[in-house]
Amino acid sequence: MEVLYGLHPVEEALRAGSRRFDHVCIARERHDQRLQSLVDECRKAGVRLRFEPREHLTRLAKTPGHQGVVAVVREKATLELEDLLDAPSEGKPQLFLALDGVEDPQNLGALLRSADGVGADGVILTERRSAPLSAVAMKASAGAAEYVPIARVVNLSRALEQMKERNLWCVGLDERGTLSYDEFDFTSNTVIVLGREGAGLHDLVKRHCDHLLRIPMAGKVASLNVSVAGAVVLYEAARQRRAGGVKTAFPAKKKERKGLGLS
């Protein structure tokens, strides 16, 4: 079992119905309509409630930032990559986000929130050197993590090859990329690959990307925070899919991949 804390994460976990709740602790000191609405939702769902001193919730959550709500729940289930890829996409091109060793749970949570916001089909995380799906990440996602399908893989390079075999285009974000992110056509099946904080993509992962994209920077700093960069590119992909794509100087994608020797 693990904990969730904060109003949004606990509310969304209840609504999603994807977790088994053991109980929810409510701070005795807090009395307001927002909290009462959550109490009512718990009772409606048959979830046990405990009214405890705020200090008890702080010890349970290991932070005072719990907003008077801490839930003890079963760990969020993750998928196998094949299950993620096989999920129905309702006839629309698939869009995935793959994270190459993002270690900050705040960044992970923010990226899950952005992935949910654009309606991404799922997020791929690595088993090692990756932030866990912890209470901190869940809080940063504001509950969005409960809705985003997540797969964990041992080897991201191998996973990208599997995705290529499923006709997905693998595009990595790199400050030395040759193509601006808004010049790439995201209207085909695509996986966007983001690297580690500071270090970026591993060399082997870069070599498994069909394209490396950059976000042009007009200031003195070379790059954006990974969660901000991910949001920028995800929303560009979503914008293009609504608008019907962009004109690109590149030849047809199938020919381009063949010419690069990447298939």
Image: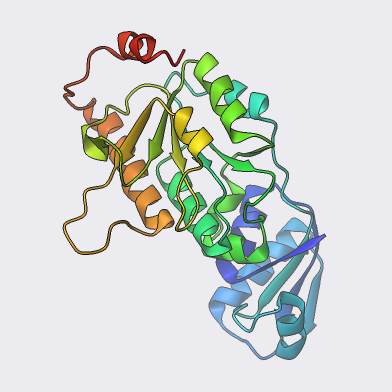
Residue 197 in the image: above or below residue 101: below
Nearer to us in this view, 247 or 208: 208
Please name the residue shown 32% across and 47% down the image.
Answer: 175
Residue 194 appears at what percent x and percent y? 45, 44
Count of numbered labels shown in the rendering? 0
Closer to us: 205 or 55: 205
Nearer to the camera, 251 or 35: 251
Residue at left 50%, top 59%? 107
User: In the image, what residue occupies the spot 76% across and 83% down?
Assistant: 59
Q: Indicate the position of residue 248 as horizontal and vertical percent values.
A: 18, 24
The answer to which quarter of the image holds residue 14 is bottom right
Q: Quadrant of the N terminus?
A: bottom right
Query: Against 112, is 96 above or below?
Result: above
Left/right of residue 244 with respect to residue 93 in the rendered view: left
In the rendered image of this protein, does residue 198 appear above or below residue 210?
A: below
The relative height of residue 228 versus residue 243 in the rendered view (above or below) is below
